[in-house]
Image: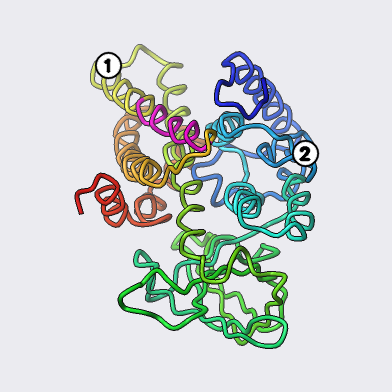
Amino acid sequence: MNATDAAVRESDLAKLRSVVRDFLAADRAEFGWQPAVDSWLGGWDEGFSARLGAAGFVGLTIPRRYGGHEFGHLHRYAVTEELIAAGAPVAAHWTADRQVAPSLLTYGTEEQRERLLPKIVAGQLYSSIGMSEHGAGSDLAAVATKATRTDGGWLLSGTKVWTSGAHHAHQVVVLARTSPADPQHRHAGFSQFLVPCAAEGVRVEPIVLMSGAHHFNEVIFDQVFVPDADVLGDVGNGWHQVTSELSFERSGPERILSTGPLLFAAIRVLGSGPTPDDRSAVAVGELLARLISLRQLSLSVARRLTNGGDATNQAALVKDLGTRYEAESVELIADLIEALPPNPELETMLRTAWLHKPMFTLRGGTNEVLRGVIARGMGLR
């Protein structure tokens, strides 16, 4: 049986999980990283990403001819789930592995694949995604960044915002308009470009959170030359490409487990003392029951992707339900641990979770917009 077949044996996935857990335990013991909420956003650790790549846990779905492991989405799901549940510092390679690799495999040229995929497998390509703009957040079709034809390529001008990790990244994958806007066909005329952050005319400005943390950026493109070799996919096909790419962003374990390390730490603390009262036991039981249900929904998207299906609507549903669960779990856990003895690790994660809570339902497309996607998929609008 090929490893990419839908009929993946559970025993194989269980063995893979065991190996990943052993790696994480040993790596944490040696390098001292601490579990974190939202580790896929703020846990930037290039050394960890390189060690993870060397251990064979990055680029699982990438074909062997590009240095990958040629496994299916369920294998990648299992590894991803273990990493996020452990709060491991995965942010450096995250976007490249989650979104850029599938896009390159589906739409990229052979030269692009040979140039970039081996670096992704090694955990040594850091990429950011340039979609949102000041006037085009949830309404991505309002993107105004423009690419104009010139000799041998394109001149790119515009501004992207909320660009995670751009201050560290090697490249930004930019969605830009390559033909005039047509009010009757708002999703037409977009293309994607692979833009090096070091290119002349690219400027990265920090967006610093209230906590002082720096994850997001504003990226300004001032007549940046992008050669034809760095167009991703077909000119004019950008909208289809980014909406397909968003299925990977919206449906993974990170949409239900960003606060997992906080929940698991709270359960460990509760379990280490006297038997919890009925109220605490019911609250924990409810959180875990919801998490198990959401996990089944998220897994169904991974299975659909394994079978080569379109998971746009299902991914939107995972993101809507999952991020609401994450936000609500922060409040419930805060109530649960009020009466517990001080625990620095738990308190640090709770502070981060409170600060990040408003972002959960915004990033990757607001939940209100996603409900529109779901409604259209159901034929209701």
- Picture coordinates of residue 186, whole percent (x, y): 36, 72
Residue 58 appears in the picture as rendered:
yes
Q: Which residue matches tag 1?
A: 277
For the N terminus, the quadrant is top right
In the foreground, 127 or 378: 378
For the C terminus, the quadrant is bottom left
Q: Which region is colored magenta?
A: 293-305
Label whose residue precedes the other's in the sequence (2 or 1): 2
Q: Dividing the picture into quarters, in which one does residue 111 lie? A: bottom right
**Membership of 295 in magenta stretch:** yes
Instruction: Identify which amino acid the numbered label 1 is placed on.
Output: Asp
Helix, strand or loop: magenta stretch = helix
In the foreground, 192 or 95: 192
Q: Which residue matches tag 2?
A: 64
Q: Dividing the picture into quarters, in which one does residue 109 lie? A: bottom right
Q: Check disc 2: other Cα within 10 Å, few if <14, some if 14-19, many if 20+.
A: some
The residue under the point 35% across, 64% down is 138
The residue under the point 64% across, 59% down is 127
Q: Check disc 1: other Cα within 10 Å, few if <14, some if 14-19, many if 20+.
A: few
In the foreground, 35 or 292: 292
Q: Dividing the picture into quarters, in which one does residue 336 lie? A: top left
Q: Which residue of the protein is positioned furthest toward the left in this rendering? A: 380
The residue under the point 62% across, 79% down is 203
